[in-house]
Amino acid sequence: MSEGQTNPGDPEENTEPMESEKKIRERNPITRPAAEGREQGSKPQQEGSGVVGMSVRDLNAYYGSFKAVSDVSMEIQANKVTAMIGPSGCGKSTYIRCLNRMHEVISGAYAEGEVTLGDQDIYAKDADPVIIRRRVGMVFQKPNPFSKSIYDNVVWGAKINGFRGDTDELVERSLKQAALWDEVKDRLKESGYSLSGGQQQRLCIARTLAVEPEVILMDEPASALDPVSTQKIEDTMDDLKKSYTVVIVTHNMQQAARISDFTGFFYIENQGDPGRLWEFDETEKMFSNPDRKETEDYVTGRFG
Amino acid sequence: MAQTTKVREEGAGQQRPEFKTATGTRYALDRLFTIVVTIATLAGVAVLAILLIDVFRDGAPRLSWEFITNPPSQIFPETAGIIRPLVGSLWLLGLTALISVPLGIGAATYLEEYAEDTLFNRITEINISNLAGVPSVIYGLLGLGIFVNLLGGLTGGQSAVTGALTLSLLILPVIIVATREALRAVPNAVREGGYALGATKWEIIRSHLLPMALPGALTGTILALSRAIGEAAPLLVVGASLYLTYNTTNPFDRYMALPIQIYDWISRPQDEFRVLAAASIIVIMVVLLLANSVAIVLRNRFQK
Amino acid sequence: MPRETFQQELDTLLSEVLDLGGEVEGTLDTMVRAMEEGDAALAEKELGVDLRFKARGAEIDEESMILQARQAPVARDLRLLYTVQAVTNHLVRSGTLTEHICHALVDTAECERDEDLEAALIEMARTARRLFHEGMDIFRDRDIDRARDLQAADDKVDLLYSEAMNLIANPSDGSPGAPEWRMRAALTVHYLERIADHGVDIGGRTVFLVTGERIESAMQQYINRDLREE
């Protein structure tokens, strides 16, 4: 039995967990494992890294009575970057927010279907959204640091999730992983707002990393940034996928082509229809020889 | 493309016939409007200045330590002081703040962050705004019925507590509205950022929303408290004393109030009483100024 | 329509390639006729034509690269540019080889020749012309079904090639022809085989353009066949 394999109900762990990290995970597993009989296939899981992939089956998302996303199924592999592309309004952002149960924060919005994180269904009746959101972190399109110091920005999430270890070390580690440490190490007490747009976004990445997620969702993380900041964020993603699973929504096709391992194309046939996953494959295939005409029209810019 | 070349060929000063620029008139109107709004501002400031100058001219000479510490008198204006109304008003200020601020901020937080968007809640919202416009004497009648008669045993009848409770009812809508506006002004991105880190609603409110909303809420609160301190009519209805032989030493005592005392002195024919009133007005304004300063200090502390 | 300018640029580039292809085909036709009729004067007309082909090929390459730099093509656009560059290369090479053969025809016009070998050469030339035309047609029409047949026709060229090489190594009993002529004939055999190959490859590239698959992988079974079984 390898290090990465666990029994149902145990949270996954790194090979050498820090005491503090261990505490967050132990204290907050999702309450009950998925029902028996869900052994089908091996859940995408990197051996020994404690990182899991996600499995989506027949996901539908609604805003009240309006169906925004219909029947999406996909495998999100661990330690890979999966990109979602597609025209505006096709439900990509809605879909990604269903992966950490942020979709239902909006009044009247809900989702149906099965989404497994590792081998646990996050939409199970007794699954705790608060815990799920720690395990599946999210970085938003517009950088949204808190109105606190850089230090407190990084530490706050960890503290409320029960972190009891060395906060200085946590801050340094997280900022280094987000490629921001060198730029801010001398001004950790300054407000998060004093940073540039690209730095703020990396700060948001750092605070997400500080709570030790397993999956990181990114909703167009670089679309509000200049090319240099965008390049830094893309370089960061290359490193991030070694330790985490990354899912990114992007309007920038070259970005999807550059950084992702798998790409999903979302599409709406007629106005008012729900968005569907039209094609999903390895990025190389999607950008050199996609199967479906609409996918090819979209990536070659011939849409409309 | 043809149009731009045309502009260049015709040279500066040539204009297309459709654009009848009457720049003279436009600039004149612009200047006129600037003058009009400046006059509007100056008018308000001028009236305030006249009032203040008048009051200071009359009342300043009368100010002295004895004035503040002596008890009031109908008979001997030379030795009359305002200690009892001052103490009463300070009690009212303190108790009203203690009651209305937590209630107001709490209610606003509930309405803004927790309440569902139901018909009942929308009706409540409209009514709260309307309540801010109800004449203050009506609140006096309400206070008389509930706090003096119905709950007389608890409140001690015509006591400072009753006065404070009545004033709290009066200013609660203002505080609620101001706090709600302040909470609404906090960008939703802050809430999303909090949820995405696996925080509960209360953790987000406590750590981010309330601190960010506090400056706006405090501004509204100060305005509300200032209004409360200046009220005479509702206090008369709930039984503020026109004459006391002792200083208010506990919340269940009877009390006097500065606005009532001012009203009393103003309505007397003798000049000396008018001077006393002017001096009292100065004292009331100093109290308000101090209260405002406290709020500003608190606001600045939270605004970093 | 979105990217209309880009689409026009692609269409223009493609038509330039087709024009070049037409010219190379024309030169090839002239060469074959010159061989059949023994008309050196006809062949002489085509001398130096390869310079023009090379220049046009370089232009097409340059335009192709600029399009790739500016327009970041993906999927079918990328495959098109990739195919355009490969096909252009095939065309320029074929044109150059054709010109070399014409040169040989002119130089050996007065030489004695081996009748059998000459017949074989003409047969090869006709086949090469046919295959080249076929490849260009497939590219023009994007008809990938014919492309698979074309891959199979490559066999015939291989057999002709073996036969001709055999004749060169072992002259027949009649007149062996002048040594100069014989040497040129050997080279010509090689060149004709190459031209046929280019034609077949053009057909193969078309399959990649349309389907994104390389014909070699699509036809793995065919490639691994045993030649002697045919």
Image (spheres, rainbow, N blue to C red):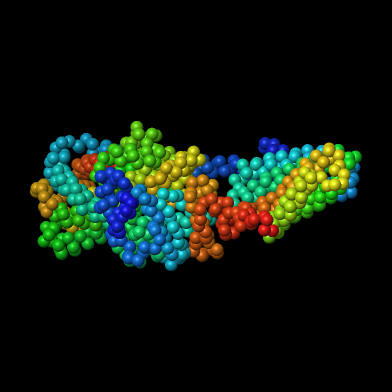
Query: Based on the displayed image, in which of its 4 quarters is residue B132 positioned?
Result: bottom left
Please state which of residues C63 and A64 is positioned toward the viewer in this rendering: C63
Residue for point 48% across, 52% down: A262
Query: Which of the pair C66/C167 is nearer the observer?
Result: C167
Q: Please provide percent x and percent y for residue A221.
A: 45, 47
Q: In which quarter of the image is the N terminus of chain B?
A: top right
- The answer to whether residue C7 is seen in the rendering is no
Whether residue C186 is visible here, answered yes or no, is yes
Q: Which residue is drawn at 44% across and 44% down?
A: A237
Q: Which quadrant is home to the C terminus of chain B?
A: top left
Q: Where is residue C128 in the image (x, y as percent from the top left)?
A: 77, 50
What residue occupies the far front of the structure in this picture? C173
Q: In this view, does B144 lie above or below B25?
A: below
Observer-nearest residue: A125 or A78? A78
A69 up-or-down from A203: above or below:
below
Pinpoint residue C209: horizontal percent, then vertical percent.
65, 53
Estimate the x, y position of residue C223 in percent, counting from the top left.
63, 54
Instruction: Identify the residue at horizontal 51%, vertical 40% (top origin).
Output: A227
Numbered marks: total: 0
Compare residues A286 and A236 and report the one nearer the observer. A286
* Side of C212 relative to B167 (left or right): right
